[in-house]
Image (cartoon, rainbow, N blue to C red):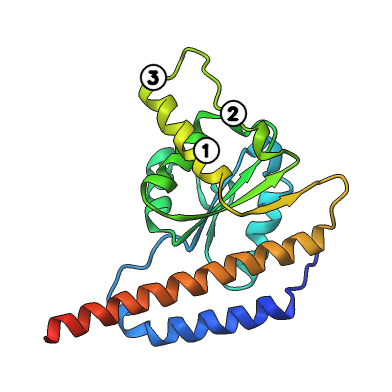
Amino acid sequence: MQQSCSSSAKNLCRKLVQVRTRNSIQAAAKTRPLCDIFINHRGIDTKRTIAGLLHDHLFRLGLRPFLDSRNMKPGDRLFGKIKRAIGDCKLGVAIFSPNYCESYFCLQELALLMENKKRVIPIFCDVKPSQLQVMDYGIRSGEQLQMFKWALEEAKYTVGLTFDTSKGDWSEFLNSATEAVFKNLVELEAESSNRRSTYILQGRE
């Protein structure tokens, strides 16, 4: 499926490039991060549809999204690489779907994103926020349940996107999601640049 990026998303892309260019000297001295965007999703619901399409769309636009099925190879330590990707990413995209909360790994990734204070864009795919509940099947500790519930509530009360896979316009959705990603990356890059400038000025005083 060929998707085109909206003009507003292209403008945001140019802004992001401009901000990154200003930060290129500082960035060159650092180890290249594993990814820009971490895509948190339930594979059986969205890997072959919304998650995969969004990953490929962002990748074609020059970003570095992380999706387990695209970025991991045989021999990789499953949670080790995912934990590193979450630590490295600037932004998380959490794709909530009907079977999301049944997965320990989905909730664990979401909790790690929140614990690492990553900004997260929620996408509610074929599910309403009110339908998302952490279930206790007697296999998770009380501490884990509390952590998962906290992370889920944080995401549910964050402004996000909604999409109905049976009725929605896929092209329009991909453009909207892409624009949201770029807007947030531009803001995060600007905030990071301002913090570095403040740190440098304070060091000279």
Comparing labels 3 and 1, the label whose residue is closer to the camera: 1
> Vertically, is 55 above or below 19?
above
Q: Which badge, 3 or 1, comes first in the chain's sequence?
A: 3
CA gap, disc 3 and disc 1:
16 Å
Residues under numbered marks 2 and 1 in contact, where contact means CB atoms less than 8 Å apart: yes
Q: Count of labels shown? A: 3
Q: Position of residue 200 (x, y in %)?
A: 21, 82
Q: Is residue 27 visible?
A: no
Q: Which badge, 2 or 1, comes first in the chain's sequence?
A: 2
As helix, strand or loop, the secondary structure at mark 1 comes to helix
* Quadrant containing the N terminus in the rendered view: bottom right
CA gap, disc 3 and disc 2:
16 Å
Identified at 86% across, 44% down, the residue is 166
| Residue linked to disc 2 | 133
> Vertically, is 31 above or below 106?
below
What kind of residue is marked 1?
Leu
The quadrant where residue 99 appears: top right
| Residue linked to disc 1 | 152
Q: Position of residue 2 (x, y in %)?
A: 80, 67
Residue 50 located left or right of residue 34: right
As helix, strand or loop, the secondary structure at mark 2 comes to loop
> Vertically, is 179 above or below 47?
below
Is disc 2 surrounded by few (<14), some (14 to 19) or many (20+) residues within 10 Å? some
Q: Which badge, 3 or 2, comes first in the chain's sequence?
A: 2
Is disc 3 surrounded by few (<14), some (14 to 19) or many (20+) residues within 10 Å? few
Identified at 43% across, 43% down, the residue is 76
| Residue linked to disc 3 | 141
